[in-house]
Amino acid sequence: MSETAPNTTELTSQYSTQVAGDLERNLKEQERLSGEIEALQGQLAALRHDHAVLLNIQQVLGTPTTADSPSTPPGAVVPAPRKKAATSDGRRGTRNSAEQAGKRTGKKAAAKASTVRSGPTLVDLVREHLADQREPRSAAEISTALGRQHPERTIKATVVRTTLEGLVARNQAQRTKQGTSVFYTSLDASETATPTEDSSQQAD
């Protein structure tokens, strides 16, 4: 009995050491995977943000979407092939029906795009609104004003901000920053306002 006790104690010590090592390796592996998951989530969030910005720019440019566009809902249902189209090559009917569905989707997108383009573009609306303003306006203020003037159109502040940045890039608008807020003015309005200020100073 005296020999069995030391052997048992030694085995227990070995198992305890092995379990402690396994636990340490397990925790390190969890930390490594958690770090990779956080990095991937950050990359996914950045990609989603870029995707939203690209969609806004595409909407501003008025580019029609196609059936192969990434914005096509993943749950779109493709009609099943007709029985009459079934031939010795069964895949031919499926391919034809898919092509027809793509053509119909493309026609709908083109019709929608032509309807949007039939009226003034958002760029024209934003440019005209800025030209009528005597004071700087923010993207939120401009989107609210345009939404009231054109209730039939869906005007988002993010799209208006993208449009304004495009006008600034083309030297058709001027951007000023007051604190954390960004305001925009038409270059024509700022140019016409400058002589007025000079004349008022001369009058004083």
Image: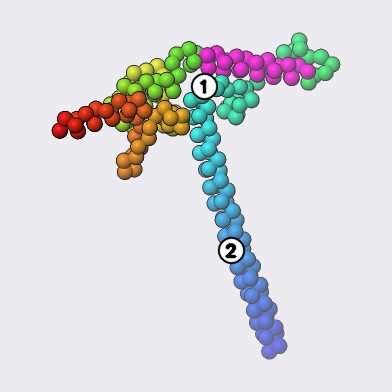
Secondary structure type for disc 2: helix
The label nearer to you, 1 versus 2, is: 1
Give 94 or 71, whichever is nearer the viewer.
Answer: 71
Q: From this view, report whether residue 107 is shown above or below residue 191.
A: above
Residue farthest top in this picture:
84
Give 165 or 85, whichever is nearer the viewer.
Answer: 165
Q: Is residue 38 left or right of residue 178?
A: right
Q: From this view, report whether residue 42 is shown above or below residue 65.
A: below
Q: Are marks 1 and 2 in contact (CB under 8 Å)?
A: no
Residue 175: give its label. Answer: none
**Residue in the picture at 70% in, 18% down:** 99
Residue 62: give its label. Answer: 1
Q: Quadrant of the C terminus?
A: top left
Q: Within 10 angstroms of label 1, few (less than 14), some, or many (20 or more) residues? A: some
Residue 162 appears in the picture as rendered: no
User: Which segment is the magenta one?
Assistant: 92-114
Q: Quadrant of residue 124?
A: top left
Secondary structure type for disc 1: loop
Q: Which residue does the numbered mark 2 point to in the structure image?
A: 27
Lower position in the chain sequence, tag 1 or tag 2: 2
**Residue in the picture at 55% in, 13% down:** 111
Give the colouring mode of the picture. rainbow
